[in-house]
């Protein structure tokens, strides 16, 4: 492609947090031209009426999905609620490249039916979709028409674990993931559990033993280990707007040392622009990645023999959602993956 090529973008469900984050980042993408923004409840409103911080940017007004002229679109970001995306995407023209930010295309058909209690309504596309953890599935993403963007929790748990499982340095049956996310991970819809008085000045676990990111995490780790893996995973809601920190407890196997784990992770992510393994003795914090597409990984010895602790920090709205989606689009279109994603952290 030439430096002057531009791709016409539509964002479905543009009035949510991930939609706003897509727009914030894509405004600095030299090859992106925003052609259509949908939000059924806010249809026919100017974008500035929903997001005042994006007013005056020359972006199109919000419309319904039925009003989009697909002949004028090349790439679709789908930020619709889980369960509503399947039929919408199944009805889109085949010339479109699609990055879906919902959970609808992340799982195989049997697992989806088990966890969601219904059959998938577009199984042919479900089989076709590439899983969008870019650093792990890059070649499949480059060939794909449809990419299933990962969930925010798997986006922080999988990068440190997959290389270690592939190298057979850790026990697949002894993985505990303790993860904490900012409130924006719950979405923008009004709900009691997201009210300021319910969230502020406290922390609580939720989705205990039945969170919908569990099967996605198990599926990816099973593929890495070459056998079935089921992890212990508990998410927690933190009184902060954005950020996600996973603390992962593992058992080493075959006489492996912390240095072996460090070396494997450094090799796996050598040259990667976004996934960085911190030096021995350093651990990441959410403030180190706020507003960026970075994924920072740190390691520590446990005081229990043959055990170690991994810590991974991401911004749940960027690497955990919209930034990852743009990285996937860049890979699909043959663009440098860093395009529009080179922001430094907002610190402090």
Image: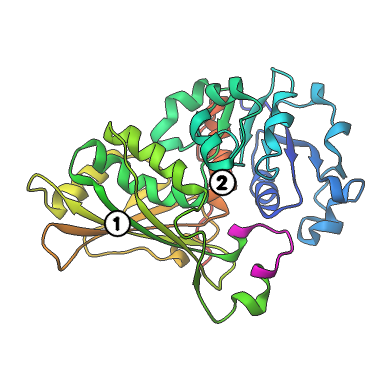
Residue 339 visible? The answer is no
Residue 60: x %, y % from top left: 85, 42
Residue 211 horizontal side relative to residue 11, left or right: left
First in sequence: mark 1 or mark 2?
Answer: 1
Residue marked by disc 2: 323
Residue neighbourhood size for the residue with mark 2, other residues' Cα within 10 Å, grouped as few (<14), some (14–19), many (≥20): many
Q: How is the image coloured?
A: rainbow
Badge 2 marks a residue whose secondary structure is helix
Q: Residue at (92%, 46%) from the top-left corner?
A: 44
How far is disc 1 from disc 2 in space, using C-alphas? 21 Å
Relative to 219, is 280 above or below? below
Residue 206 horizontal side relative to residue 312, left or right: right
Residue marked by disc 1: 278
Residue 24: x %, y % from top left: 67, 51
Question: Residue 339, located in which quarter of the rendered image?
Answer: top right
Residue 312 horizontal side relative to residue 150, left or right: left
Nearer-the-camera pick, 8 or 195:
195
Q: Residue furthest right?
A: 44
Q: Residue at (62%, 30%) from the top-left corner?
A: 120
Q: Residue furthest top?
A: 94
Relative to 202, is 192 above or below? above
Badge 1 marks a residue whose secondary structure is loop
Nearer-the-camera pick, 128 or 1:
128
Nearer-the-camera pick, 333 or 311:
311
The residue range painted magenta reads 185-193
């Amino acid at each position: 492609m030439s430096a002057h090529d531009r791709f016409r973008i539509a964002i479905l469900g543009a009035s949510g947090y991930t939609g706003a984050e897509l727009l914030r980042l894509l405004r600095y993408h030299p090859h992106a031209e925003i052609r259509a923004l949908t939000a059924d409840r806010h249809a026919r409103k100017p974008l500035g009426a929903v997001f005042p911080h994006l007013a005056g940017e020359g972006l199109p007004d919000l419309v319904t999905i039925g009003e989009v002229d697909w002949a004028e679109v090349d790439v679709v970001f789908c930020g619709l609620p889980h369960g509503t995306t399947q039929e919408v995407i199944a009805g889109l023209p085949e010339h479109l490249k699609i990055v879906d930010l919902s959970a609808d295309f992340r799982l195989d058909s049997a697992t989806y039916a088990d966890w969601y209690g219904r059959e998938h309504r577009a199984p042919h596309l479900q089989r076709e979709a590439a899983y969008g953890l870019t650093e792990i599935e890059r070649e499949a993403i480059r060939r794909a028409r449809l990419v299933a963007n990962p969930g925010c929790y798997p986006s922080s748990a999988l990068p440190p674990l997959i290389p270690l499982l592939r190298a057979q340095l850790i026990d697949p049956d002894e993985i505990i993931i303790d993860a904490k996310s900012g409130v924006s991970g719950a979405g923008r819809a009004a709900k009691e559990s997201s009210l300021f008085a319910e969230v502020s000045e406290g922390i609580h676990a939720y989705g205990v033993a039945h969170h919908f990111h569990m099967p996605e995490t198990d599926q990816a780790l099973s593929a890495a280990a070459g056998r079935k893996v089921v992890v212990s995973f508990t998410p927690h809601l933190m009184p902060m707007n954005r950020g996600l920190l996973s603390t992962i407890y593992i058992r080493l196997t075959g006489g492996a040392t912390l240095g072996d784990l460090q070396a494997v992770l450094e090799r796996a992510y050598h040259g990667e622009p976004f996934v960085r393994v911190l030096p021995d003795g350093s651990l990441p914090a959410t403030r180190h990645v706020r507003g960026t597409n970075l994924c920072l990984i740190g390691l520590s010895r446990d005081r229990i023999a043959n055990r170690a602790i991994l810590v991974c920090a991401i911004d749940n709205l960027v690497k955990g959602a919209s930034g990852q989606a743009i990285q996937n689009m860049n890979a699909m279109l043959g663009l440098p993956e860093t395009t529009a994603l080179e922001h430094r952290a907002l610190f402090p």
